[in-house]
Amino acid sequence: MAAKLKFSLVSPEKELFSGEVDGVDVPGEEGDFGVLPNHAPVMTTIRMGTIAIKDGSDTRRMFLRGGFADVTPDGLIILAEEAVDIADLDAEKLSIDLRNAEEDLADAKTDEKRAAASDRLEYIRGLTEALAS
Amino acid sequence: MASLKEFRDRIDSVKSIQKITKAMQMVAAAKLRRAQEAVEAARPYAARMSAVVGNLSSAMDGRPGAPELLVGTGKSDVHLLVVASADRGLCGGFNSQIARHARTEVSRLVQEGKTVKILCVGVKAADQLKRIYEDKIIDVISLREHKDIDSTVAADISARILRMFEAGEFDVCTLVFSRFKSVISQIPTAQTLIPAMQSLDEDATAPDLGGAAYDYEPDEEDILKVLLPRNLTTQIFQALLENVAGEMGAKMSAMDNSTRNAGEMIDKLSLQYNRKRQSMITTELIEIIAGAEAV
């Protein structure tokens, strides 16, 4: 039995995943990387994208909106700004969200609101792509 | 002397009040459960976040070029006090406790000759602080428009604090809020947000790396630049959640008390009402009998 990687994924609202897995693929800011048990300690920022949690023949995919990954000898911790399980996504609801986000962007009056709205839109577009792939 | 009708009216009005307090208590109880779940769900993130910041800052320790958010501006002349309270009253001493804690904090700082600026989150503490520190309050952020506290609320507040920090408007930022310990116990707490170094737990030491070197990607400074604002948001978010849970807990026990008081009052009034009614009947009877005898 090979060693397992302790992995936890937390977002500000809640802990999304906590447990032992075989490996995790992480979209790092400077390139994707895979984390296996006994990975060298590393700390990095994550860009928006999909992580793949591999355990046995199972692969769970989660979509993250940026955050940090911290690999220590104790395991991998991902602090995500926002994260969803791709299995929970619903194409129909996403297309509604997408339309809403586009409208929000068009309606935004101040620079601040516009930046927030375009962030949101980008996130939802990312989600849609992740679901399609 | 009060007539019977007056008694009845009073009993009715106390009964309606009791109904309202009872309903408020039940609403608070339901909200409390949700708020408590939210606090507990958010705790791992906050804990991990401070562990990561702790890791990084011990790596940065004593090195030049550390970000000011972490080590401070080197001065502590101007203090920003972020006072987080509830937006609604009727929750016992909850808001007053926070306001009192903020007041002692302010007077301590003033005595030390510091300049104090106050940013209120939630209007209730602001109402109380306004009486003495009107000139020090720079703004009041109301939470009423947000139905649920989510991380975007905290992000707005932290963005605002960061803008002020970058503009050099203050040196040290302290957050005053109420830590939710249990339904009946909330502890007003002051926590230093900026510089972040001061708020780290003493025991948040670097993990044992087994001799391996920590790799940073991009380098420490770039990560810290992103991480510290996130940390600020997280701390504020956590504080807001603790506050909501505390508010609901305080409200629940305050409303429970009121309901019980109303019950006691109804009992007392009913007793008085019945006595009065009896004595009136007795008087009437005596009058009738006396009348009958006279005939």
Image (spheres, rainbow, N blue to C red):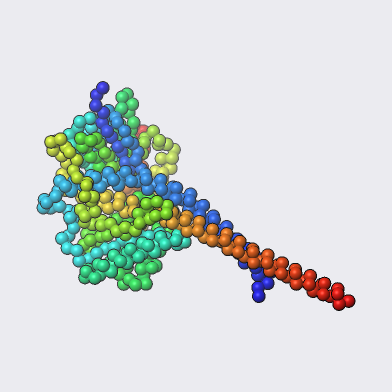
* Residue in the picture at 23% in, 32% down: A35
Residue B270 horizontal side relative to residue B243, left or right = right
In the rendered view of the protein, which quadrant contains the N terminus of chain B? bottom right
Against B57, is B162 above or below?
A: below
Residue at image position (42%, 62%) is B93
Q: Residue at x 35, y 38 (%)?
A: A16
Residue furthest toward the bottom? B294
Q: Residue at x 40, y 60 (%)?
A: B94
- For this orientation, the residue located farthest to the top is A1
Above or below B239: residue A132: above
User: Residue B64: x percent and y percent?
Assistant: 11, 52
Q: Where is residue A2 drawn, in percent x and y?
A: 24, 24
- The reply, left or right, for residue B76 in relation to residue B183 is left
Report whether residue A112 is seen.
no
Q: Which x, y percent locates residue B127?
A: 39, 67
Q: Which quadrant: the C terminus of chain B? A: bottom right
Whether residue B279 is visible, yes or no, is yes
Q: Which residue reaches farthest front?
A: B293
